[in-house]
Amino acid sequence: MATGDRPMNLHLDHALGRDVTVSAGDLQLFTYTYRPDTVRLESPKPYLHPIRTLAGDVVSLLRPHDHVWHKGIAWSLPHVGEHNFWGGPTYVHGSSYVQLENNGSAVHREMTQLSVAGGRVEIAHRLDWISQDGRAVIDEHRALGVTVLDDASWVLVFETTMTNVSGATLDIGSPTTKGRENAGYGGLFWRGPRSFTGGTVQSPAGTGADDLRGTRADWFAFRGRHDETGRSSTIVMVDDTANPHHPPQWFTRSEEFACLCPAPFFSEEFALGAGDRVTFRYAVLVASGDHGDDGTAALADRARAVLTRPRTASPVWGVVA
């Protein structure tokens, strides 16, 4: 609810075969590009960008020159068996990063839900994860739910169920499981704007920066400041208690650039057997302002409450392959 008992006017616009934009009133909260024109080297996959606070500030970055495969918020996995669904080179122990012929793609198959009801937007679709040489690796069903909490914050619930269709066990890991220390990225990855560099990283245990990378927690937050306006914004990411390896280790940066990633495969591989499936769920709260240590912890509690709500069925419309 935005104010009192009046629901926020959420709506969506579907650019057929390309993307869905979710808005609150006249403000575009984000665009979800589900069929991007990304080059193979960057492991094409759906992403959210631009992402805005309710004050209109952009809190995401697309194709930064240092890591062009970073795309706003995206479900990105660098080591899925022999495949790279992250983008760019693959970490090979003893050789550092090597550009291999293994950059796979997460390809949109069909839209299964687009709805606005009860103050919530629901988007769901199916994807085929295809290897660079054209083999089927994973069948994914993904759902995104959007709720506005008040005049300052809104929440995205991201859910993915992945089924191994490769015919063999897939060991899902990270550069750290392959031998690179404290580089366990992979999962739901957020890249923040340039002006957030040097911002505050917060966990339930306190605040810091790159020193918090690799620690385990239910949630992490990033508090940064924007150029031009001088305003601040806050991103909070919450891990579902049912996720494998909960609570996860977190991959975060502040000193070089702003990012957050609850990384379930940070230092321990997950073996997904042939025909098996696994589900991950997260809440991402986007808030205007810097709410301080206690206020940010309270935002995490609110995001957790949204994540634990039962998901109600919504009418399906606009189904498009």
Image: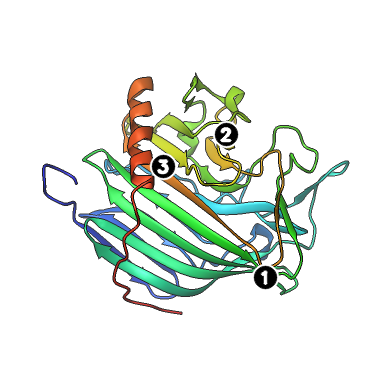
Q: Which mark is residue 252?
A: 2
Question: Between 226 and 132, which is closer to the camera in this rendering?
Answer: 132
- Evaluate whether residue 290 shows in this view: no
Viewer-nearest residue: 201 or 230 = 201
Q: Position of residue 294 (x, y in %)?
A: 35, 21
Q: Earlier in the sequence, mark 3 or mark 1?
A: 3
Q: Amino acid at mark 2?
A: Thr
Cα–Cα gap, marks 3 and 2:
15 Å
Q: Amino acid at mark 3?
A: Val
Q: Residue at x 27, y 40 (%)?
A: 55
First in sequence: mark 3 or mark 2? 3
Q: Quadrant of residue 177?
A: top right
SS at mark 1 in the image: loop
**Residue bearing the label numbered 3:** 59
How far apart marks 2 and 1 lie (CA) works out to 31 Å
Question: Which mark is first along the chain, 1 or 2?
Answer: 1
Mark 2 vs mark 1: in front = 1
Q: Which residue is mark 1?
A: 165
Q: Residues within 10 Å of mark 2 (few under 14, many from 20)?
A: many
- How busy is the neighbourhood of tag 1: few (under 14 within 10 Å), some, or many (20 plus)? many
User: What amino acid is labelled 1 in the image?
Assistant: Val
Examine the rendered structure and indicate whether residue 64 appears above or below residue 206. below
Q: Is residue 61 left or right of residue 26?
A: right
